[in-house]
Image (cartoon, rainbow, N blue to C red):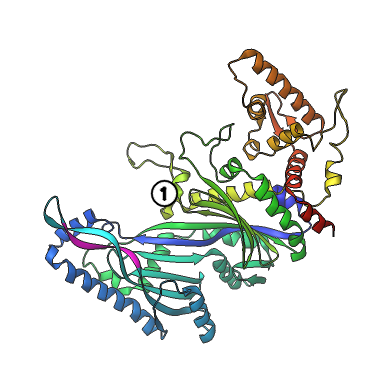
Amino acid sequence: MKSFLTQYSNLIWGAMSGLDRVCFRGTQRWLANTRGMASYMALRHILLKDFGPWVASITRKVRASCEQVAKDAGRPIVYLRSSSAAKDELAKGIAERDGIDSGLICAFSVVEPCMSFAVAANRKTKMLEPTMRIRQCVWVYHYWNHPQYGFCHARIQTWLPLTVKACINGRLWLARQLDNHGLAYRREGNGFTWIEDMDKTQEFLNDQMNTDWPKMLHGMVDALCPAYRNLFGKETMPHYWSADETEWATDVLFKRADDLARIYPQLIQYGMSVFDSPSVLRFLGRKVTAKGQVHKNLTQAEVSTDMKRRPEGVRIKHSVNRNSVKMYDKHGSILRVETVINNTREFKVFRDSDDHKHGKATWKKMRKGVADLHRRAQVSQACNERYLDAVADAPTGESLRELFAGISRRAENKGKTYRAINLWKEDDQQLLRFIAKGQYAINGFRNRDMRQDIFPNVDPTTNIACRRATAKVTRRLMLLRAHGLIRKVPKTYRYVVTKKGHRIASASILAGKATVEQLMELAA
């Protein structure tokens, strides 16, 4: 990220990173599966024949309590006939109509799919038993303009196992923090186009991660359904809180929308053309071998890249196994890079063993629980920084003629003269495509890596053919070094691509994919 901020330092106010949208889920772990439900029913002496009336009584209490909260606040309770209704927009409209800047806005009740219990016959045991299946039940939504977290909502499933889902937005939370400290800003939606004090703003975003998440979310449940505290008698069954989806955004604030509009098409074209699958895997912290293959200890990944034009801007998105990194120009002057994590098992966290007496702390698969939310933030921030550093190499400020002028002439290195690089020659194009690959951006590459890419049909066990291919690659490496496109890592056999090399290689790829119509349009 430092490379990007340095390159465009004269065009930007600054940058900030923090939570965007976070979707939490509260689960009744005891009642979340059929085995737990059966044990609870046995403990409370609830017979299967009484299961229906028992769960119906719980549903009535939960729904009545949720709706009573809205009635006590004097806010409307709206029944929605379709689960596809735009609830956020409806709630914002009610808040604007009634001037609700702080407090409960409204409650919605709507029938939506859920996982819930039923009593069914087991053909093998020929006995009745509780089962879990997809069903339809009433969910009750509460929308707030929360005095601390801004616009947010929570919803509770009125059927067992009483799953709760809540959603907050870190940028709207930030707006409340700025208001409370009297800092001026300009905001559009959940994006800030200017903030008086960027350093203080980043401190506020960092402070959000110090939140006691279970305490905050339990407080939401108490406000949403007060009857829940005494719903199960003497047993206290607090929800287990996890984060189903997290969005961690890095916003680069440009001073003028025209400046971002000038460079953004090149950034999009660069991301679509240059970032191959190994590059995307590295952005998202995946281990990739020298051949661009996923590390054997990790699950296989399917990588996809797509671009869409959305109301907030043009968006490019790279996805791997339900996790993604995306970039878009938000509200004209905000360049946002955002990492979205849905599948936490793709990442690792260093934590103690489950056996606290004898276990040692090791790297384990990340959990969805809020206990690992700090690690998710670290992983997401690292992904955003890698992505911004990569797009910093996009050629946005100089003409192709100026960029290619140096390599189009003969070069001299240590008293030896080397030929020019011919951009229209297939062998030289192959070299530039190789050094543009993202999998060599961190650890560099060796002669063997280039040989396997340029001469894939050479059998490494055939000594003569292998030596000849190695010699040819050595001459190509010397050519690239002479033109300053790569440099050798001292005391190793590895080479890394220079900043000049990244810019020239990516520009050559972009130029090769440009059509005559596109070039004529740019020249007009």
Q: Is residue 261 above or below residue 155?
A: above
Indicate whether residue 56 is drawn in magenta: no
What secondary structure prevails in the magenta region?
strand
From the viewer's perspective, is 130 left or right of 477? left
Bin the neighbour count of mark 1 within 10 Å (Cα to Cα): few under 14, some 14-19, many 20 and up: many
Q: Amino acid at mark 1?
A: Arg
Q: Which residue occupies the foreground of this view, 244 or 378?
A: 244
The residue under label 1 is 367
Q: Secondary structure at mark 1?
A: loop
Q: Residue at x 77, y 41 (%)?
A: 504
Q: Quadrant of the C terminus?
A: bottom right
Q: Which residue occupies the foreground of this view, 138 or 9?
A: 138
Q: Residue at x 54, y 82 (%)?
A: 96
From the viewer's perspective, is 468 left or right of 278? right
Q: Is residue 256 visible?
A: no
Snapshot quadrant of residue 104:
bottom left
Image location (x, y in percent) of residue 307: 62, 56
The span shown in magenta is: 113-121
Image location (x, y in percent) of residue 91: 48, 78
Q: Is residue 469 above or below residue 318?
A: above
Q: Is residue 97 above or below residue 178?
A: below
From the viewer's perspective, is 59 left or right of 347? left
Image location (x, y in percent) of residue 41: 17, 60
Q: Residue furthest top?
A: 464
Q: Is residue 85 visible?
A: yes
Snapshot quadrant of residue 59:
bottom left
Q: Residue furthest front?
A: 516
Snapshot quadrant of residue 219:
bottom left
Image location (x, y in percent) of residue 275: 64, 45
Report the number of discs: 1
